[in-house]
Image (cartoon, coloured by chain):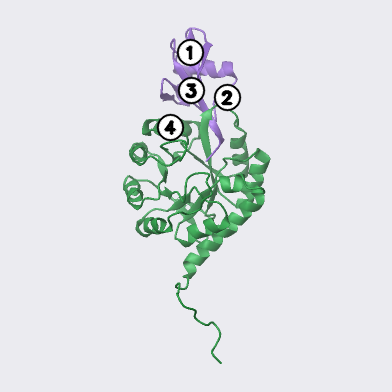
Amino acid sequence: MNVTVNGESREVADGATVADLLAELGLPASGIAVAVDGEVVTRAWHARTVLTDAAGVEILTAVQGG
Amino acid sequence: MDDPLVIAGREYSSRLITGTGGASNLAVLERALVASGTELTTVSIRRVDVEGGTGVLDLLRRLKIDILPNTAGCRTAAAAVLTARMAREALGTDWVKLEVVADDRTLLPDPVELLDAAHTLVDDGFTVLPYTNDDPVLALRLEEAGCAAVMPLGSPIGTGLGIRNPHNIELIVARAGVPVILDAGIGTASDAALAMELGCSAVLLATSVTRAADPEKMAAAMRHAVAGGRLARAAGRVPQRFWAQASSPPR
C-alpha cells in the first residue's frame, strides 16, 4: 500500500507500523516527532500504530531557527 | 544566583536569549552562542529531510543550553498547536515560543490566532512564551491566558530596525506580571541596551548576531549591552532636561 511521508508517496508493506517505517528510513526514535493524519503519535505508540492506505505521515525534527 | 531571570520557575543568570536561526554553519553558531553567554536558545521544527539536520540538537546538548522550540512558519492557531505538540514529542520539553504570523512580508503576529493558540496550549500544559505585537492590550490578554512571559517585537523579524515604539514597550512592562522579553527587530547593541533600559526582563535575538559580519564579536557586544542596560535600569537614570545644567561648580 502507499502512504505519504513528508509530502512524498512511498510504498510500505501491509500492516506496517510507524516503528517499521522509521526503521526503514533509518531514523532514530529520539529527536523526532511523528504525526499521522494530523495527530501526534507518541513514541510509546510507534510500534502499535499500524499505517493505513493513503495515510499522511509527517516526520519532524529540530533545525536552526528563530 | 545574582539577579536571575526567572521564567516559569526556571532561573537563568543570562538575560540574553540567542536564537540559532541564520548562522551560516554550526561552527559559527557555536562560537556565537558561547560568546553571547546564553543559557536558552530557539530552534524550529521542520521535516527531517530538509536542510539543517539534527546536528543543532547535538550542539545544544553539548553546550548545555536549554532548548526553546518555536512555531515559526505557522499561520493558524491549529498549525501552531500541532507544531508545539510535535516539538514536545521530539524534544521532551513543554516550553514553546509561540509564533503565529499573518503574512510573509511583515511576519507580524496574527493577534487573533495567537491568543487562540495560547489558550489551547496553556490548557494542554505547555509553558507558553508568545511572540507578540508591541500592543499593551494584547500583552495583558496573553498574560491572562496563562502565558509564562510576553515577548513583544521591537520591529519586524529580521529588519534590524530596533525598537520603533519604546513607549508601548514601557506600557507593557508597567503592567506585566510576567517577564517581558523584547523579541525581534534588534539591529545592534544599543537596541538591546535600550530594551533593558525600558524595563524588559530579557532580550531574544538571532539575526543581529548570526548575520553580523563577525557573529562571535556581535554576540559578545549583545551580552555586554544587555548587562549594561539592566544595570542602567536599576541605577535610575537622571531626568532629561531641556536646558543645560552645569556639572562643575560655578567658581
Would you name the residue on which mark 4 appears?
A: B85
Would you name the residue on which mark 1 appears?
A: A3
Question: Residue B117, relative to residue B132: is it above or below?
Answer: above
**Label 1 residue SS:** strand
Question: Residue B183, relative to residue A53: is it above or below?
Answer: below
Question: Residue B4, relative to residue A20: is it above or below?
Answer: below
Would you name the residue on which mark 3 appears?
A: A58
Q: CA distance from mark 4 to mark 2?
A: 19 Å
Q: Amino acid at mark 2?
A: Asp
Could you classify mark 2 by the number of other residues whose Cα lies within 10 Å: few (under 14), some (14-19), or many (20 or more)?
A: few
Q: CA distance from mark 2 to mark 3?
A: 11 Å
Could you classify mark 3 by the number of other residues whose Cα lies within 10 Å: few (under 14), some (14-19), or many (20 or more)?
A: many
Residue A24: image quadrant is top right
Q: Chain of mark 4?
A: B
- Residue B118 at x, y percent in the picture: 36, 40
Q: Amino acid at mark 1?
A: Val
In this view, which residue lies farthest toward the front? B243
Q: Answer with mark 3 or mark 1, whichever residue precedes in sequence.
A: 1
Q: CA distance from mark 2 to mark 1?
A: 16 Å
Q: Are marks 3 and 4 in contact (CB under 8 Å)?
A: no
Could you classify mark 4 by the number of other residues whose Cα lies within 10 Å: few (under 14), some (14-19), or many (20 or more)?
A: many
Q: Are marks 3 and 1 in contact (CB under 8 Å)?
A: no
Dot label at residue B49: 2
- Residue B243 at x, y percent in the picture: 46, 78
Q: Are marks 2 and 1 in contact (CB under 8 Å)?
A: no
**Label 3 residue SS:** strand
